[in-house]
Amino acid sequence: MTGLVSASEAPSERSVARRIAHDSRVRYVALVTILAVAYYGAAEIGYTLRFTGAVAAIVWLPVGVGIAFLYFGGLRLWPGVVAGDLLANQYSTLPIGSALGQTVGNTLEVVVATFLLRRLVRSGRPVDSVAGVCGLIVAIFVGTAISATVGPLSLRLGNVLATSELFDVSHTWWLGDTAGALVVVPFALAWWQPIDPRSWTRARVLEGFLMLAAVVGLTGVALQSERPLVYTVFPALIWAALRFGPRGSTLAVVVAVGLTLWETAHNAGPFVVDSISRSTLSTQLYVGVASLSTLFLSAVVSEREEIAKGLRESRARLVGIADRERRRLERNLHDGAQLTLTMLAGQLASAREETRRNPDLAPALFEDAETHLLIAIDELRDLAHGIHPTILTDLGLAEAIRSLVGGSPIPIRVLELPSGRLDAIAEATAYYVVAEAITNAEKHARAETITVRVVESGRSLRIEVGDYGVGGASESLGSGLDGLRDRVEAVGGALRFDSVPGRGTLVRADIPIAEVNRPRFWPIHGR
């Protein structure tokens, strides 16, 4: 019967697999087609926003479209760039060989820029941090340099350009592609994810409309004059970056740049001068400065908001941890020392009455009371040790860690410890980092050995606790790692951890050290 069931299910499983593969192919073809159409459409828009011809356009928008598609959809969509570029080539003015050379350069431009962007910015959106924006700029600059080299060389080989024109065309080509990418790619990265409707109140929507109206108004006023007033739009762009982050800043840049390009392409505005190359260069520099300024400012704002959000969450977790710790202490006191002392009080009261009737029983009664009193003292000592180890206060961090690792069921190798005393806050923080990291490794890592290294370096204390266990640790709520981060960051330190499945976990913490007036080396204490 089992064999019959398997045989009847096999065709169904194969049909499901074929249907999934077919759907995947259909989706891939659809994405490539959409990319080709979008690339071609962006090229047509670029051709309308020009006054220097197809060879030296003011901005080349398709490069931004290609990078955005490949960044979200994967490098495998590159045939869409090839198809779109082949459709966009103006074969009436270009030899076939030069046109194909341009397509090769433009395709490599998009693929290389996307590859570098994925390598340089591995987490989060590139427009949400200064480091991400720097990675985005490097990727765009390198990618567009490829097209600005291959394309003009192809035109030279096709006798479309003279050798003396190569540098000027390459320069304009590179700036045009870079400007196009700086406008389109950040906009796509910022607006890719859906908007949370709860964050857009009526007042915020009204402010957004006012900001866009200011961008349009200031740009329109500046473009109606031959004087260099176009940069008066920057206060509105700053407004967009400060109040609306990457989404607002990229949208404002698209509006300002779009209006400027349209007027310039129609021989109007302050960038139109007698020299076409100078007009092109001035417009491209404006686009670059506007894009980069707002990108960096909005990235700083995003980082600030992320830090503020992290601080709020950390504060909430610390409040929760403190409340749970208070309840734990209350429970331990009630069930432990308090109960023992209550029993001892009753025992002493009974002993008082008993010794009045039979004085000979007094030694045994008081000995029994002493035993219970010592038990209560031990319970209080254990409770106090959990709050702050006495050995840490008396002998310092090194001895406290040695005492900590001595009772571990897993072998622990202490590679290095500080030789002297540190300030109390740094020592307490370092101790609990080591203790929590060791506890996590003992509970979850299934490691054969644990290593501990604590090094004093300048004005900071570097802590490293590693294991060779299962790895795959996650900084999720309740794992202990989030509490460690809160404790370390509360004193101005930084916590990082690497946990690769099958290769173990390494916890690193850097804790600032305050100056203390204590001996640099351990006192001998008569030993």
Image (tube, rainbow, N blue to C red):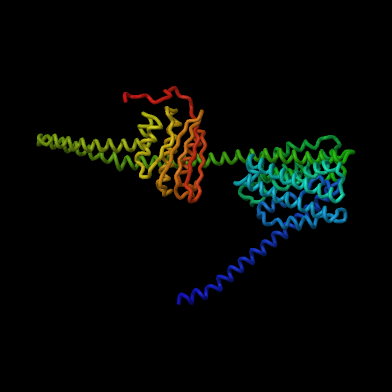
**Where residue 309 appears, x then y in whole percent?**
56, 41
Q: Would you identify the image quadrant in which residue 399 lies?
A: top left
- Above or below — where is 417 with respect to 276? above
**Where residue 335 appears, x then y in whole percent?**
30, 43
Residue at x 80% of width, y 51% of height? 45
For this rendering, which residue is in front, 24 or 250?
24
Residue at x 87% of width, y 49% of height? 160
Residue at x 63% of width, y 47% of height? 119
- The quarter of the rendered structure image containing the C terminus is top left
**Where residue 422 appears, x then y in whole percent?**
44, 28
- The quarter of the rendered structure image containing the N terminus is bottom left
- The answer to whether any part of residue 206 appears in the image is no
- Above or below — where is 358 with respect to 71? above
For this rendering, which residue is in front, 155 or 418?
155
Q: Left or right: 149 with respect to 319?
A: right
For this rendering, which residue is in front, 209 or 434?
434
Q: Left or right: 358 with respect to 118?
A: left
**Where residue 400 appears, x then y in whole percent?**
38, 34
Q: Left or right: 264 with respect to 237?
A: right
- Above or below — where is 138 with respect to 6? above
Q: How many marks?
A: 0
- The answer to whether any part of residue 401 appears in the image is yes
